[in-house]
Structures are given as C-alpha cells and as structure tokens.
Image: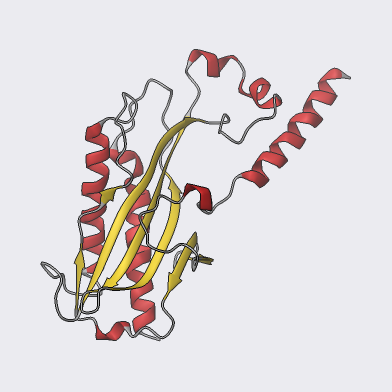
Amino acid sequence: MKSNFLLATLCTATLALTGCASKYVDPEQYSGFLKNYSTLKEDKSPSGAPVMRWIKPGVDVSRYSRVYIEPSQLYPRPQPTEKIPASTLQGITQYYDQTLQREFTKVLPLAKGPGAGVLIVRPAITAVSAKTKGLRPYEVIPIALVAAGVSTATGIRDQDTSLATEAAFVDADSNEVVAEVVRKGAGADLENSAQVMQAKDVKAVLDGWAKDMAKSYEMLRTK
C-alpha cells in the first residue's frame, strides 16, 4: 500500500515539476545586457526552438551589405569555479564567436568593424550552469529527494549543463537596435559532480543558436 502511495506521489510530483520547467528564460533571469526587455515576445526560432525576441516592425534588412560580429561577452562577469573554470568560460565565448562568424558568412560578408551598411551582432553569454539532474532549484517537493536516491549523496548522479544567451542586433549607421533575442539551451550531460564542465559540452547549443540567428536574418531578407 505504501509503495503504491509513493509511486502516485512521485508521478504527481514529476508532472508538477515538468510544468514548472519553462522552456523560455524567465524575466527574473534577464541579465540587464539588453536595453529593453518589455518588447520581447514568446516565439519560435527557425529550428523550432522557443525564444523570446523582438524585431523592429518594418525593418528593411536588405539594406545591410555586411555584418560585424562583436566579441561575445560574459554578462554579468562570472566567478570561475572548480566545476566551471575560467578556461571553460573563455572557450565558450571563443567558440560562440567562431560559430557566429561561420554561420553569418553564409548570408552576409563579414565586416572588420562598424560602418555604412553594416549590421552589428552583439552577443552575450548570460548564464552557464552545471546542476545535478533531478535536483533543480524549483524542485521543492521532498519526494524529489527520494527519487534521487543514494547516488546523489555519493556524487555519481548525472549532471545537466545549460547556457543562456542574449543578443542585440544594431544598425551601425544609426546605432539603433533593430532586433533582440533571449534564449537558453541544454548542453551535454556530465557523468557526475566531479567532472569538470568544458566548452565542448555546449558546442552543439552554440552551433544551434548561431544557425538560427543567421537563418532568421535570411528569412527576413527574403520576405
């Protein structure tokens, strides 16, 4: 009888927690990197991923002949840890720059800096985390501890890695923001709490973001 009750409680808890796990970045988690969050709306990226974004109504992207990718920032500046060292954070921003440049060159020539007819892409990594699977901050129901079992205490439970980004797209001629996007993504799982997170664990996330940004521009241009 007790086991049936425990199973029912666990199922209820699982459903409740699933509902709390938003696919979008929550407003309270906005970093302050962007100038205006009030215009952001829930949307889908070209690949179908959930994003919060805004595009200036009537913007004519065909006027841009080149694109300048600003070096990506870590915002706000994080404190490296043993789990996520400075080398990982640096590797993430370096790879983000590379993949943004690679994908945007498919739709626009790269510029060496701001100038006439240039679209500026201003990206930031606003969150990097590695957390024990099944023990996320929103899991306040005690049954989650039962579900995790002894393995959590011994540090052998898998860990989730995740990232969040915010990016502004700026008209170099007017210095006006013409689009903004906020989104998050899940990287590769780490085997346990002792495994150090590396940039390679989130490369697929960064690739997906860059492809979607470039594709979004291309779709606007062909409208």
Residue at 32% across, 31% down: 84
Left or right position of 169 against 57 = left
Give the residue at the far left of this rendering.
112
Quadrant in the rendering for residue 85: top left
Colour pattern of the rendering: secondary structure
Residue at 43% across, 23% down: 192
208 lies above or below 193: below
175 lies above or below 33: below
Total number of numbered labels? 0
Residue 68: x and y, percent? Answer: 19, 67
Residue at 28% across, 85% down: 62
Left or right position of 28 against 116 = right
Name the quadrant of the C terminus.
bottom left
Quadrant in the rendering for residue 54: bottom left
134 lies above or below 49: above
Left or right position of 171 against 190 = left
Residue 217: x and y, percent? Answer: 34, 74
Name the quadrant of the N terminus.
top right
Towards the viewer: 91 or 188: 91
Residue 122: x and y, percent? Answer: 27, 61
Residue at 61% across, 23% down: 148
Left or right position of 221 against 186 = left
20 lies above or below 194: below
Towards the viewer: 95 or 24: 24
Residue 219: x and y, percent? Answer: 38, 78
